[in-house]
Amino acid sequence: MLARIAAAAETVARPLSDINLVAVSKQQPDERIEAMLACGQRLFGENRVQEALVRWRERRGRFADLKLRLIGPLQSNKAWEAAAFFDAIESVDRPKLAAALADAAQKLGRCPELLVQVNTGEEPQKSGVIPDQADALIHAVREEFRLPVAGLMCIPPADEPPAMHFALLAKIAARNGLSMLSMGMSGDFATAIRFGATHVRIGSSLFGERP
C-alpha cells in the first residue's frame, strides 16, 4: 500500500512524507490488528469511541508511539471520553459538539487534534457540516470555543466522482488557512492525493474485507 501511495504522490510531485496512512481498523479481528502492528503501522482510525477503548486500551501500553484518530461521528455526551483517549478527532461538525470538546479540553488540560468534517455531498444520512456553513463553523470553533482547528475531513458520495468533492474540501481549507486534509479511501486515495490529501484512510486494501 505504501508503494501505491508513493506512486500516486510521485505523479503530482509530492513527497511521501507529506501523506499519512491511516489504517482504518474498525471491526477488524485481533489477528489482523496485530499483524499490522508487527509491520510497523502505528496510525489507526476508529469509528466508535467504545469499540476503540476495547480494542486499543491495552495496546496503548505496549506501543508508546501509537496514534489513534476518531473518524466516525461523535455524540456530544461522548466528547470527554473521545478527547481523553484519541490523538485526533476528525468529525467536529456542529457547535454543540465543539462546546462539549472545549469543556473536555479545559478539564483535561489538553486537546486532541481537531478536524471539521464537511458533508460535501450534502447527504442527509451522513455527518458533517454542509459546505456553505463550513466557514462559519470553523470560525466558531476557533473564536467562540477557543479550540484549534487543524484541518478538514470529508467522505464523498459513493455514487459521484470524488474529484469535485476533494477539490471543494481543498478550496474551503485554503480560504481558512488550513493545510490538513483527511480525504481518500481505498478506492479513491490517488485522486485525493492529487487534490492535496495529507491523510488517507485505508481499510479494505490493507486489512482485506471485514469478516
Image (cartoon, grey):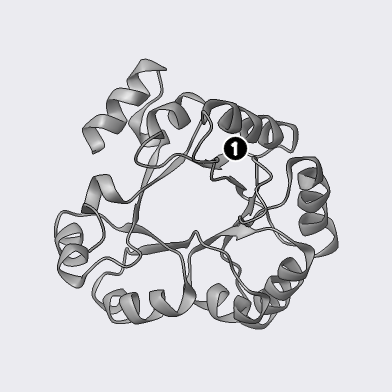
Q: Amino acid at mark 1?
A: Ser
Q: Compare residues 174 and 124 and report the one nearer the observer.
A: 124
Residue at 64% of width from left, 40% of height from top?
121
45 on left or right of 89: left
Q: Position of residue 20 (x, y in %)?
A: 39, 43
Q: Compare residues 146 and 211 and report the one nearer the observer.
A: 211
Compared with 73, 151 (above or below) is above
Instruction: Give the SS element for disc 1.
Output: loop
145 on left or right of 194: right
Residue at 60% of width from left, 72% of height from top?
110
Seen as rendered, the residue at the extreme front is 159
Q: Position of residue 149 (x, y in %)?
A: 67, 52
Q: Which residue is mark 1?
A: 179
Compared with 27, 143 (above or below) is above
Residue at 24% of width from left, 54% of height from top?
209
Q: Position of residue 168 (x, y in %)?
A: 65, 31
Quadrant for residue 175, please give it: top right
Q: Position of residue 139 (x, y in %)?
A: 81, 50
Residue at 57% of width from left, 73% of height from top?
83
Compared with 116, 166 (above or below) is above
Compared with 127, 49 (above or below) is below
